Image (cartoon, rainbow, N blue to C red):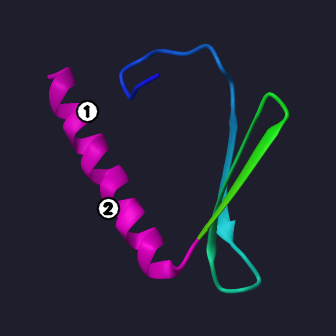
């Protein structure tokens, strides 16, 4: 499965700070839980990538 493959899988996504000063992205789908912890600098890089992807997706719509 790639980035352009559609899927009917539903998932829950939570993002927030941990008590250890990390940023956690938590994904849960079909009974599988995936906690991913990032230091704040990595989280900022991920946020920039998400913003860039959103901008690119918006450009495809017009």
Q: Give the range drawn in magenta.
A: 38-62
Residue at the image point whose x is 40% and y is 61% from the top? 47
Give the CA separation, mark 1 to mark 2.
Answer: 14 Å
Q: Quadrant of residue 2?
A: top left
User: Residue 46: percent from the left, percent from the top?
Assistant: 40, 61
Q: Which residue is at the far bottom? A: 20
Q: Is the magenta stretch mostly helix, strand or loop?
A: helix
Check disc 2 and report its element: helix, strand or loop: helix
Q: Viewed as shown, does residue 11 lie left or right of 23?
A: right
Could you say which disc has been placed on residue 48 in the image? 2
Q: How crowded is mark 2: few (under 14 residues within 10 Å), some or many (20 or more)?
A: few
Could you say which disc has been placed on residue 26 in the image? none
Q: Viewed as shown, does residue 9 lie left or right of 43?
A: right
Mark nearer the N terminus (1 vs 2)? 2
Q: Viewed as shown, does residue 27 lie left or right of 43?
A: right
Residue at the image point whose x is 44% and y is 73% from the top? 42
């Amino acid at each position: 499965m790639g980035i352009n493959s559609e899927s009917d899988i539903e998932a829950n996504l939570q993002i927030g700070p941990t008590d250890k000063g990390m940023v956690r992205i938590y994904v849960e789908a079909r009974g599988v839980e995936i906690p991913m912890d990032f230091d704040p600098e990595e989280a900022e890089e991920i946020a920039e990538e998400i913003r860039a992807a959103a901008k690119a997706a918006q450009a495809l719509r017009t």
